[in-house]
Image (cartoon, grey):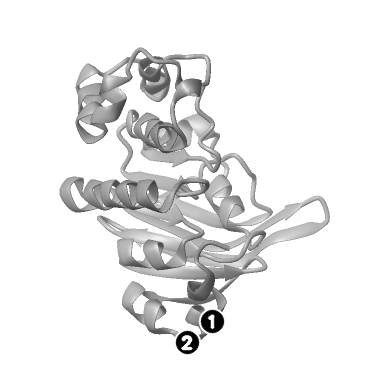
Amino acid sequence: MNFSVNDLHVSYGGITALSGVSCEVQEGEVVCLLGANGAGKSTLLKSISGLVKPKSGTITFDNTDITNNPPYKIVSMGITHSPEGRKVFATLSVEENLVMGSYVLKKYDHEQLEFVYNIFPRLKERRGQMAGTLSGGEQQMLAIGRALMSKPKLLLLDEPSLGLSPLVSKELFALIKMLNSEYKLSILIVEQNAGAALKLSHRGYVLDVGKIVMSGSSKELLASPTLKESYLGKAHH
């Protein structure tokens, strides 16, 4: 698996959302995207997953230009997106939500369902329950589980800890780390809790008003005075 974004420009109407963004994720890496609200982090993930069309620049995955591919094609190639706000199907059961995650594969994979239940045993316990009645943490697990159903090579996570208690967030981060360390899943994560995201990842990029202003190993970024001042002091702003 190789993945890179090169000189990406995205505008909404007359407003520039991304201005010349370049980044990459290597096989087996967890990379985090940090930045204040409105920095363009979600826009970048939406551009990668085909939900937003860039004005210029290229997105390459497995040596293929996927810049203008429709979302379903991007999923079938091996990139899935767990969106901000979870967006589970509230009136469907947990299991129905998970099965929806494999629709692009044209067939429902029982082994993959067991794999997801193995990672998130709580979802297995609640398999028949309406997704809308789950707690915030369980809904987040369901959103990630649903994204895993299409057997991704690269998982995009948008603000997984948003609205969750510190304890539930900690549990979720441990599960994300396990997906990478045990199953070698490559992950690109947008996360408001900069400290936790850097501890979880190998490398990071900092976005500010649509531009990447800093990048480096997580160790380097954790030690950066600028980053400490801007983001680490107020991890839950």
Q: Secondary structure at mark 1?
A: helix
Q: Amino acid at mark 2?
A: Pro
Q: Residues within 10 Å of mark 1 (few under 14, many from 20)?
A: few
**Residue drawn at the location 64% of the way across and 45% of the way down:** 53
Q: CA distance from mark 1 to mark 2?
A: 6 Å
State the residue position of label 2. 225
Q: What is the number of the mark on residue 229?
A: 1
Which residue occupies the foreground of this view, 69 or 75?
75
Kindly indicate the quadrant of the structure image that contains residue 50.
top right
**Residue drawn at the location 48% of the way across and 80% of the way down:** 228
**Residue drawn at the location 31% of the way across and 43% of the way down:** 153
Coordinates of residue 170 in the picture (x, y in percent): 33, 53
Q: Amino acid at mark 1?
A: Glu
Answer above or below: position of 120 versus 60.
Answer: above
Coordinates of residue 71 in the picture (x, y in percent): 52, 34
Which residue occupies the foreground of this view, 23 or 214?
214
Tell me, yes or no, if residue 62 can be seen here.
Answer: no
| Circles 1 and 2: CB atoms closer than 8 Å | yes
**Residue drawn at the location 58% of the way across and 63% of the way down:** 237
Answer above or below: position of 159 versus 222.
Answer: above
Kindly indicate the quadrant of the structure image that contains residue 124.
top left
